[in-house]
Image (cartoon, grey):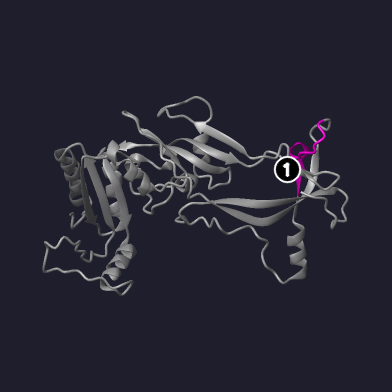
Amino acid sequence: DDDDDDDDDDVITNVVEIVSVIPYGAGTSLEGHLQFLFPPENNDHANHNNNKRGEIVEIPSSYFTDHDETKINSYRKVRIRRMGGISIDMCNFQSIGEVGPGDSFVQVGAGVTRKTLNEALRHTGMQFMVDPGADATIGGMTACGASGTAAVKYGTMRENVLAMTAILPPTTISSANANGNESNANATPKVVTCGTNALKSSAGYNLPAIFTGSEGTLGVLTEVTVKLHPIPSHVVAASCAFSDLHSAAEAVAMIRMMGIPVSRIELLDETSIRAFNRTLDGSGGSQQSFDDDDDDDGELHLQPMDEKPTLFMEFAGHSKIAAGEDLSAARSICTEDYGGTHFA
């Protein structure tokens, strides 16, 4: 901040200039991280002056580095000016910790992507199960509270983050002294670590849950400890079409009520199925060709689906029989109880 030489109001003694610090991971989210808080462009002279002058707020004097400690509960009127932002590329935070025998957690850098982590964990028999679809970074998934199709069994990022390291903004505002130089003695960022490696803990505040989903507003995440789960021995997938969305949703609710351990479940409506079908004939995207005459060429042959609400499910178990039993139970609910068709 500096002295407000342009203001005629003697009560307002400071101008606080705010620069947004925005971490950048893989760029797969939709939060608009790089939309810096510049004043809106406006040719109107009055609005331009208002944006330039900034918003007037009251801030406790204790937040300033030149605070007089003898003045208790005092406030300063300051003018807030947003000066744009800085984007921090987190791609160099690539550390992946060791996973010892019996460990069900791993400490990773914020710039490690989901697929990179699982590739590094292949030899351990464990896997990070939160799957938002995109190959997002672990730090970005934590900051945005990512979930995905596997959340029905493994939960979202909020349930899979055990601990983290974060850089917090300064707790004080740098003040210019009489010579115009800033006093930064107490205005330094703070490095904090919260959470533990324990899968169960009820001691103290659940700070990792507060940071998860905060979208960078509380601090910059640099390291995250996440839960791991065993890689399933047997996995089987299925889909089922329904006449209406209500029947499909009721089938999902009944599968959950019956305690069938479905690993993934996703519902696409008619519009989504129609968009998928259009990509097959090239009318909605790039042309794709599929050879239906030769089923042994090792290629994936995609066929258009009925344009109906469709459930996609995945079941996993320690044996083929266990996964098959769960599949059969779900088939019975979808087809016999709720009129599902084309269960495959």
- Mark 1: which secondary structure? loop
Residue 285: give x, y in percent of width and height.
Answer: 33, 71
| Residue 312 belongs to magenta span | no
Query: What residue is pinned by disc 1?
Result: 173
Q: Is residue 22 left or right of residue 28?
A: right
Residue 329: give x, y in percent of width and height.
Answer: 19, 43
Q: Residue at x 45, y 54 (%)?
A: 26
Residue 271: give x, y in percent of width and height.
Answer: 34, 65
The image shows a total of numbered marks equal to 1
Q: Residue at x 44, y 56 (%)?
A: 28
| Residue 60 belongs to magenta span | yes
Residue 107: give x, y in percent of width and height.
Answer: 43, 36
Q: Is residue 312 left or right of residue 135?
A: left
Quadrant in the rendering for residue 49: bottom right
Is residue 121 something that shows in the picture?
Answer: yes
Residues shaded magenta: 57-69
Q: Residue furthest top?
A: 203
Quadrant in the rendering for residue 276: bottom left
Q: Residue at x 69, y 55 (%)?
A: 82
Question: Mark 1 is on which residue type?
Answer: Ile
Quadrant in the rendering for residue 273: bottom left
Is residue 206 something that shows in the picture?
Answer: no
Q: Residue furthest bottom?
A: 283
Against 216, is 289 above or below?
Answer: below
Against 319, is 204 above or below?
Answer: above
